[in-house]
Image (tube, rainbow, N blue to C red):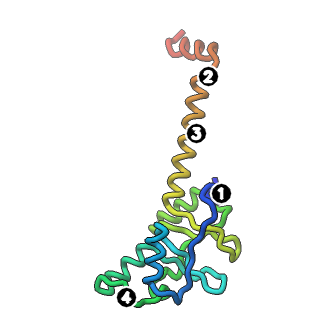
Amino acid sequence: MKVSDILRVKGNTLYTLTPEEPLSTAVTVMAEKDIGSLVVMDRGDLVGMLTFREVLTAIVSNGGQVGDSQVRSVMDKAPLTCTPETEIDEVRRMMLGRHARYMPVLEGRTLMGVISFYDVAKTVVDAQDFENRMLKAYIRDWPAEDNQAATEEAKGG
């Protein structure tokens, strides 16, 4: 399974902002849209990622206030990225290795979307559920003579 499979289900709504925007604007957007991250773009290029982790760190270092910082001073300037063709298992390893909850998806320099650790986990669980249903259906529909031979073999006969 690939990242493109997640994006196809998730849709293509993206929330971005520029590095010059006030952190207070970013916090407002994140709260209003109920999202945990914003991609920071400058002249069409990804230049960073702002997540609730960076926001909370900035608020704590500013005495509990958002203050008048710009996004540029708070954002992760080197976020993990992947492509639509990246395998989900690789994304999972990357996210776990860096404790990343969000990952921008780039095709060349074009932002295709953002996937979250939740998206990855849900995809893995859904795939496992499907596989389990298929295995249970296969076992339930096992041919009778094969089932009888297996039972006799188990009894030693």
- Find numbered disc 3 in the image and state the secondary structure of the residue it sits on: helix
Q: Quadrant of residue 91?
A: bottom right
In the visual, does 36 lie left or right of 14?
A: left
At x 44%, y 77%, the residue is: 28
Is the residue under label 1 in contact with that under label 3 (CB below 8 Å)? Answer: no
* Amino acid at dot 1: Arg
Q: Please name the residue that numbered disc 2 is placed on.
A: 141
Q: Nearer the viewer, residue 19 or 96?
A: 19
Q: Residue at x 61, y 28 (%)?
A: 138
Estimate how packed mark 2 is, as few (under 14), some (14 to 19) or many (20 or more) residues with alpha carbons within 10 Å. few
Label 1 or label 4, whichever comes before in sequence order: 1
Q: Amino acid at mark 4?
A: Gly
Mark 1 or 2: in front is 1
Q: CA distance from mark 4 to mark 2?
A: 64 Å
12 sits left or right of 28 in the view: right
Q: Which mark is residue 8?
A: 1
Which dot, 3 or 1, sits closer to the camera?
1
Left or right: 68, with 76 as reference point? left
Q: Label 1 to label 2, Cα distance in Å?
A: 33 Å
Q: Callout 3 environment at 10 Å: few (<14), some (14 to 19), or many (20+)?
A: few
**Which residue position holds label 4?**
67
Which label's residue is closer to the chain start, 1 or 2?
A: 1
